[in-house]
Amino acid sequence: MAYRGIYNSWVENPYFDEKTREELIALKDNEKEIEDRFYKNLEFGTAGLRGVIAAGTNRINIYTVRRATFGLANYILKNTSKEQQSRGVVVAHDNRFMSREFCIEAANTLAACGIKAYIFDGLRTTPELSFAVRNLHTIAGIVITASHNPPEYNGYKVYWEDGAQVMPEIASAITEEINAIEDYSTIPTLTDENKDLVVLLGEEQDTAFIEAVKTQLIRKELVKNVGKEFKIVYTPLCGTGNVPVRRALKEVGFENVLVVKEEEMPDPNFAGIKYPNPEDQKALTRGIELAKKEGANLVIATDPDCDRVGVAVKTTTGEYAMLTGNQIGGMLTNYIIEAKKSENKLKNNEVLIKTIVTSEFGADIAKLNNLEVMNVLTGFKFIGEKIKSFEENNNEKTYLFGYEESYGYLVGTHARDKDGVVASLLISEMAAFYYSQGMSLYEGLQELYKKYGYFKEETMSLTLAGIEGLEKIQEIMSYYRNNKIESFNNKKVVEVKDYSMGIDNLPKANVLKYFLEDESWVAIRPSGTEPKLKFYIAVKGKEESECDEKVAGIKSSISEVLNTLM
């Protein structure tokens, strides 16, 4: 019953505000809810916090944000030089409930610790935060966002001076500092003496970011020529992308951009969209309806913090189909290579970087064009780490493009996280190029499949919330790890990789990957941001029907095992 004691301290301690105490007192007879809110501290994972907005140690609120920020400040003060500390930390936020409040709490806590905090005058995208860390030369960055989680969530992500999310060793050290804070009342508060350390950023940061994004355009003249007639429907899903995405598209020549009015302005309820995830077709319902009405060539959606991009394209039947993250990434890989070749800009040392749970579609295209492919763990910070290592090694290798199957892409090195602004720009350029050839993106995809083989992927997700859910996820991972799995869909397993062993020169990670005799593979990993266990399935074949059969067979094999464990 230790959680009860912590609950009582929050109710009784005058440090916590009256609204928080009232919320908790209302729960006094709900033992299960009290336990879930207080049985542990909200965990600072590999890059930060994410949780439901509510009072409690296992929730995100102004107190857990203060605690995390104080831990970050202590890490900076103990482990960096005076010069590094003097650079400060930049803080950004999205459109979610409490995002502005959490941003201000973080900035004020940093300033109370003697660290300069830069904040924007309103919401900004995650990629602009990543860019600002580098552009302002700060020691770290914070963005308040829960990405594409449902409306009741918010989060807190930490970036380091290279503009990428903090790497595991720094995250672990920050976690130790946070865990050492047991008494919230010891966290320093802002005074008149240090309030000037909170600095408001202006328009120049936005312009610098957009200019950096625009330099990634490859076929500039093509866009100018086609951009006036090429029709795009865009939705920011009520998030941060509205201003920067539309500005970037307009300034390079895409003049025919229609926005989904219901989803144009920031809204923490996401205009009724339960799950504002651009990989979910339901989130693009209004966008697709507008595209049908207006005869648009392309539908683009960015998630609330604008680091992920979803795309719908018109098929040969006139309907609009969603492209997967693997399909978009593969097509962008091909487009960037071919466009750079046509402009004599492709270098022979360029490298494609993808994650271990991303399809081989883009990798095969890169390899057949004599380019190197690198695999990294899930998490865009590992792609950012490779970019940094290239620079530190005198650019012996050059970054071409990086992406992950979960709809995250980065063209260019202006940011060190996935960037929905630059991705929207390059996807539009790619679609405009196909349009100039009398083809849709959908038809372009089919051409690539004919050339490189048909690829199909699917992700099975088990949502297992709460204490029991966490235990069940661990149980399922243990089952697969401790039992020899010989086949999926009657296809022999020819290799197993357990990334918890620290293999392939990668950090340790709780991921299992099974390679099958027919070039298919299955990967299993717990989500790092949601209470989910994910099964990634990737197959290759000569045609779609063959791939559909393979995916269905593998899903059936997985379900048989899960039915015995659930």
Image: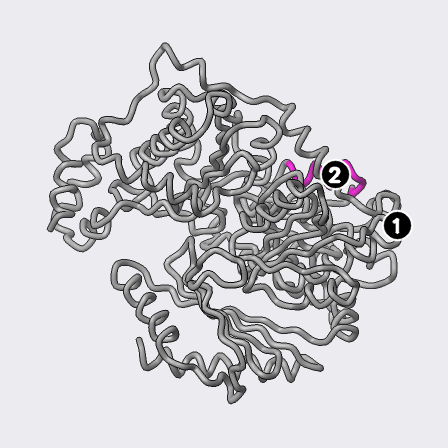
- Circle 2 SS class: helix
Instruction: Kindly identify which residue carries mark 1.
Output: 344
Q: Left or right: where does residue 147 sit relative to residue 7?
A: right
In the image, farthest residue toward the top: 193
Residue 214, which numbered label? 2
Q: Which label sits in the foreground, 1 or 2?
A: 1
Callout 2: few (<14), some (14-19), or many (20+) C-alpha neighbours within 10 Å? Answer: some
- Residue 132 appears at what percent x and percent y? 59, 31
- Circle 1 SS class: loop
181 within the magenta span: no
For image coordinates 40% across by 15% down, the residue present is 195
Q: Is residue 505 above or below residue 479?
A: above
Q: Is residue 207 above or below residue 448?
A: above
Pick the residue in front: 310 or 201: 201
Residue type pointed to by label 1: Asn
Is tag 1's residue or tag 2's residue first in the polypeptide sequence? 2
For image coordinates 51% across by 29% down, the residue present is 139
Q: Which residues are magenta?
A: 244-254
- Residue 209 appears at what percent x and percent y? 66, 33
- Residue 472 appears at what percent x and percent y? 30, 68
For image coordinates 57% across by 37% down, the residue present is 162
- Residue 105 appears at what percent x and percent y? 37, 28
Quadrant assignment, res 559: bottom left
Residue type pointed to by label 2: Lys
**On-image quarter of the C terminus:** bottom left
For image coordinates 88% across by 44% down, the residue present is 221
Quadrant assignment, res 114: top left
Q: Is residue 479 above or below residue 329?
A: below
In whole angstroms, how far apart are the C-alphas of marks 1 and 2?
A: 19 Å
